[in-house]
Amino acid sequence: MNPVAGKLLTTSHAVVQAVVKQLEDSGISRSDIVIWDRREMQLHETGFTEDNYPGIAIRGTEQQDKDGGFFDKDGILYGEKNIDKNWFYWADVNGEYDEYTLPYMVNGGKESYFTKIITQEVDKIINIPILKNAGTTVTCCMKNLAYGSISNTGRLHKQLWSETTAQVCAFPPLRDKVVLNIVDGLKGCFDGGPAANPQFLTNYKTILLGSDPVAVDRIAYDIVLKKRMEEGVQKKESPNGTKFMELASGYGLGEATPSKITLENIEIKA
C-alpha cells in the first residue's frame, strides 16, 4: 500500500478490496493475505484495519503501541524487532537522527535493513502504489517498493534517490517476489508529491497494471509529465526524470524504453 499522504491520498480501498476478492476467488485464504507498508500507524490512520479487513493481517515495520509509544517495556524500538539484520542495503551516507525522528527510521548508520515482512513472512507481493509525482519524476512502483521495504531511509533521499529506488528493487526479496504492480491512478497528484496538497490533486481516472515495475513506472511518468506541463508547473522534461528507470533497466529489472513497451489500453465507459 501507500498511505504516506494520509486519508486525502492513500491507496484506494476500492482497488484493494477488488484485489482481495480476486485473491479469494483464486482460492487464497484471507489468513494468507498481508496488507503491509512501512508504517503500521499510517495504515491504521487511512482505514487499513482489522475491522475493515477482517481475517487479514495488517502489518508495518515501524509500529506504535496503543499509547502511541515506539518503545517496548525494555526500551527497544518495536521497529527494531521487525528488521532483518541478514538483509541490508549499504550506502556510504551516514544516517544521523534526533530522538523524534529515529523511531521513524528504526536505525541510523550506513545500513538500511529490509523488513522481515518481505524477507520472512510473504512469498509473493502485489504492489499497489499511487500515481504521484516526486519533483520532476514519479513515485510509483519502484519507489513504493524500495523505500517501503527498508529502514534508515532519510539519508537516501537527497543524494541517492534514483540509485536507491533502482538498487533496492534488485535485491532478491523484492526482485523475486513481486508478481504484479497495480498503480492506483483513480486519484493522484501532479505536484507536491509524495505529500497530498489539495491544489495538486487530480482524478487521473486510470489504473496501470503490469508485471514489469520499470515499464509501468515509465508509462506512469509520461502521464504525470503531461499533466505537469498542462498545468504549467514544468516546462520541459528533466534530464534526471527517468534516471532510476534507466538504472533499473541496466540491472535487468525491466524495460525503460517506451518503444519497447507493449501498452494495451482498455477504456471503461460509465
Image: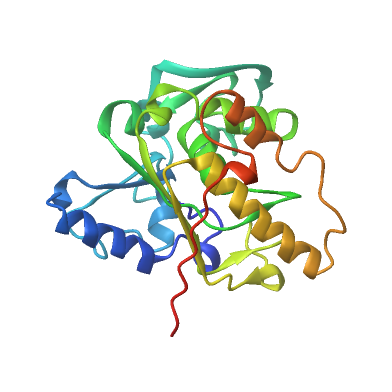
Check the image and name the residue furthest to the right: 235
Residue plotted at (50% across, 25% down): 170
| Total marks placed | 0
The picture quadrant where one finds residue 11 is bottom left
Residue plotted at (65% across, 52% down): 221
The picture quadrant where one finds residue 62 is top left
Instruction: Where is residue 67? Give x, y as percent.
Output: 38, 50
Q: Is residue 243 left or right of residue 202?
A: right
The foreground one among 223 and 64 is: 223
- Tell me how the rendering is colored: rainbow
Q: Is residue 267 above or below residue 174?
A: below
Q: Is residue 80 above or below residue 44?
A: above
Which quarter of the rendering shows the C terminus?
Answer: bottom left
Instruction: Where is residue 180? Give x, y as percent.
Output: 38, 45
The foreground one among 255 and 119 is: 255
Q: Is residue 146 left or right of residue 160?
A: left
Instruction: Where is residue 128? Give x, y as percent.
Output: 43, 52
Residue plotted at (60% across, 54% down): 220
Q: Is residue 232 left or right of residue 213?
A: right
Residue 155 visible: no
Instruction: Where is residue 28? Give x, y as percent.
Output: 15, 49
Residue 243 visible: yes
Check the image and name the residue furthest to the bottom: 270
Q: Is residue 67 above or below residue 11?
A: above
